Image: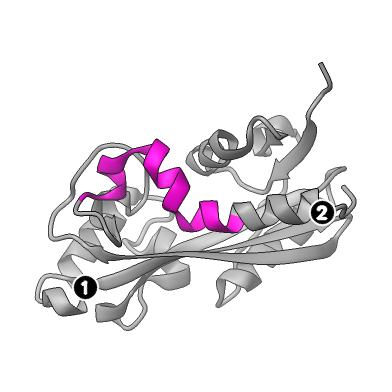
Amino acid sequence: MQALTPLIIATRNPHKTMEIREMIATQYEVLDATNFSDWPEVEETGTTFLENATLKAVAISQCVDGIVLADDSGLIVDGLDGAPGVWSSSYGGEEGNHAKNNQRLLLEMTDVPEAKRSARFACTMVLAQGGRVLADFQGMVEGRILHDLSGVEGFGYDPLFAPLGYDRSFAELGSEIKNTLSHRAAALQQVIAWLSSGNPL
């Protein structure tokens, strides 16, 4: 059996790695920070998803051999003028605390009418190798913000986001459905198409 080509995900987030691995595990060997001993902390100082994904992809690709995939994504809520946006992971005041992020989102949305609860998850993925950007890709999924947390699967804002055409949250729908609809899936499909079209690894 031929060994799979490694694809290095520039993340320490096990949920993100798991989602990507579930979607492409038959095509690539998905690695992340846990597979490397010398993995630098990359400060996300950008003001856009593209800037942050680029920072991570370039920095990590300078430290490891192979192709690196960096993902920066977030929730854009129309009723909050686009917040939390690029600050989605720290919206509640503590980086990566999903419970606090959801708590603040619910609080901010308390008086927002149904007509203004439209939202979307956006994802930008950047491929880099040897400190050089190879390509970037964008994915998006439209939906709305629910009034209460619902469901136990997924991570982040999944319990509060119902994708267009569904009355249930991503956290209720589960990974099998989410991975066909999500912003990350949409971007990753473009990544795989690019890599499969003869572009060098």
Residue type, label 1:
Arg
Where does the N terminus fall, quadrant-wise? top right
Residue at 59 percent of width and 67 percent of height: 138
Q: Which mark is residue 197?
A: 2
Provide the residue span drawn in magenta. Answer: 168-187
Residue extending farthest top: 1
Whether residue 181 appears in magenta in the rendering, the answer is yes
Residue extending farthest bottom: 81
Q: Nearer the viewer, residue 64 or 45?
A: 64
In the image, residue 102 sits, relative to residue 110, either above or below, namely above
- Counting residues from the start of the chain, the first of labels 1 and 2 encountered is 1
Residue at 21 percent of width and 73 percent of height: 117
Residue type, label 2:
Ser
Residue at 11 percent of width and 70 percent of height: 110
The residue at which mark 1 appears reads as 117
Badge 1 element? loop
Viewed as shown, does residue 197 lie left or right of 42?
Answer: right
User: Residue 107 appears at what percent x and percent y?
Assistant: 16, 66
Whether residue 123 appears in magenta in the rendering, the answer is no
Viewed as shown, does residue 98 lie left or right of 58?
Answer: left
Residue at 78 percent of width and 60 percent of height: 58
Q: How many marks?
A: 2
Viewed as shown, does residue 181 lie left or right of 144?
Answer: right
